[in-house]
Structure formats: structure tokens, C-alpha cells
Image (cartoon, rainbow, N blue to C red):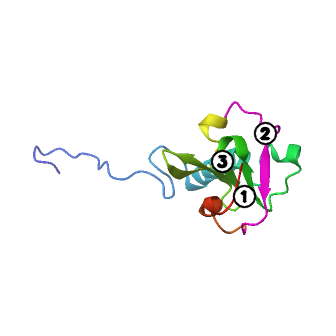
Amino acid sequence: MTANGSMRKSIGNTRKKGTRKNGNTGKKRDKEDRKYHKKVAKYYRKEYRHGPPAWARAHRYDNRHHVYFRDYKTFYDPYRNGYVYMRNGRWSFSANVPSFMLNVNLGAANIRVVKDVPISRHPEDFYNDYRWD
């Protein structure tokens, strides 16, 4: 009974066990989650391809050695899967093609395949040891 003497129906928790506030059951939510993660995984596979870069085929490059782009003083490092270039007097790394090389046809660019530097080492560490140009 309440203070004024009337009987009110208890509101309490009337949801069924296993349902959420929005009415979805756990199974339905799990299905939605699986669908979302499948979509994200598909995007990830498409956006972040592994393997040789697009320009590799034109140079018959097989992803086993570092590549030096002579005209741009830039390395492609297959171990880290990205580009190493000089920026403001320091070496910088980018997983994508550096901005100054975006409009360059890398398939026709002048390259040197660096077989002397072990694949697990950073090629920029050996820059002063060789004559690159």
C-alpha cells in the first residue's frame, strides 16, 4: 500500500530473461555483431593489402630486397611494408607512398634494388656507406 492508501501495481522489471532494453535478444545482437565484423574485415583486407606494391610488377620486383628510388632519395622497405624518406634532415617512415611521390608513375621510376642490406635491417642506416646516385 502507498501513503494515500491506494494499491499500485508494482512496475518492477518486466523484461524477459535474455532480452535487452531495446527488445533485442542476445542472439540477435550477436548476429548483428558478426555481420559488422565481417564487413570490417572485408574492408581491412581490401584497404590494407599485403604483398608487393602496385609498381612492383613493372620492375619485376619480388619483395625480397629493399628498393631505392634514386630520383626521390626514398627507400621501399618490404620488411616494414612501407617507405623511408628524408624529411627535414631526418629519416621518416610512411606505410603509404610519400606525398611528394603521389603523382609519380613508380612503375617507370628509376630504381635500384639493394641486395647488400639484409632484409631485416633498416636501409636508411646504410645510406652513408654506399653511393646511391
Q: Regarding mark 1 in the picture, which secondary structure is present there? A: loop
The image position of residue 65, as x and y in percent, is 78, 61
Residue tagged 3: 74
Residue tagged 1: 78
Q: How would you rate the neighbour count of disc 2 (Cα within 10 Å): few for under 14, some for 14-19, many for 20 or more? A: some
Give the residue displayed 63% in from the left and 46% down from the top. Answer: 36
Amino acid type for the residue under numbered disc 1: Pro
Whether residue 52 is visible, yes or no, is no
**Of residues 4 and 93, the one drawn nearer to the viewer in this rendering:** 93
Whether residue 19 is visible, yes or no, is yes
Q: Is residue 84 left or right of residue 110?
A: left
Give the residue displayed 37% in from the left and 53% down from the top. Answer: 13
Name above or below for residue 109 compared with residue 18: above
Give the residue displayed 68% in from the left and 55% down from the top. Answer: 81
Residue tagged 2: 109
Secondary structure, magenta segment, majority class: loop
Q: Which residue lies furthest to the top in this view?
A: 103
The Cα–Cα distance between marks 2 and 3, rounded to whole angstroms, is: 11 Å
Q: Is residue 3 left or right of residue 46?
A: left
